[in-house]
Amino acid sequence: TSIAMAKSILLINGPNLNLLGTREPTLYGSTTLPEVVASAQKQASSLSIRLESMQSNHEGVLIDRIHQARGKIDAVVINPGALTHTSVALRDALLGVEIPFVEVHISNIHKREAFRHHSYLSDKAEAVICGLGVYGYEAAIEFAARHIKPKDKAQ
Ligand SMILES: O=C(O)[C@@H]1C=C(O)[C@@H](O)[C@H](O)C1
C-alpha cells in the first residue's frame, strides 16, 4: 500500500548531547552522537527519507534552525536535552512553524530528579519516547516516517 509517508525529517539534538558516549554513560550509554546520526541516516535512506541532523548547545541556534525548516521539513525528531525542562521559546518555535515532532529522551526522565519530570514540549508532541537509550532515536524515526504525513506542499 502506498501510504503517504514523511519525506524529510530533521533530527535535532540539544545542549550537551555532543558529549554523548562519554557523558554519564550509565545514564546515556556509550554510543557517540556521530554514531547515532550515522545509523539514523542509514535508517532514513532505507525508508527513502531525507534526514537532516544538527546539534547545538545554544537555544537560539536551535530555534533558528527550526524556523529554517518551515515549509521544507515534514517531521522533526528532537532531543531538546535540558531545554526540555526550561524552554518555552523552543516550544513556541515548534508550534510556530507547524511541523509535527517526536520528542526523544535517552534516559527515563520520570525516574530522575523531579525537575526533569516536566517537559515544555510533551503535550504538543506526536509521541514522546524516553528511557529506551539511543534506540529511542531509531524508534522515533520509524514512527515519524510512518505516522506523520507530508503536508501537500512543494517538497
Ligand atoms: O535523557 C535525555 O536524553 C535528556 C538529556 C539531557 O541532556 C538532560 O538534560 C535531560 O533531562 C534528559
Image: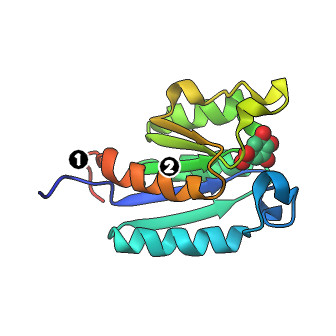
Quick check: is the Cβ at mark 1 less than 8 Å away from ligand 1? no
* Quadrant in the rendering for residue 119: top right
**Could you tell me if residue 34 is visible in this image?**
yes
Residue 126: percent from the left, percent from the top? 44, 35
Q: Is residue 44 left or right of residue 115?
A: left
Residue 56: mark: none
In terms of secondary structure, where does tag 1 sit? loop
Q: Is residue 101 left or right of residue 144?
A: right
The residue type indicated by label 1 comes to Asp
Look at 36% across and 66% down and name the residue there: 49
Q: Nearer the viewer, residue 92 or 39?
A: 39
Q: Is residue 74 left or right of residue 111?
A: left
Look at 69% across and 32% down and name the residue there: 89
Q: Is residue 90 above or below residue 56?
A: above
The residue type indicated by label 2 comes to Val
Q: Which residue is mark 2?
A: 76
Q: Is residue 23 left or right of residue 151?
A: right
Q: Which residue is mark 1?
A: 152
Residue 38: percent from the left, percent from the top? 58, 75
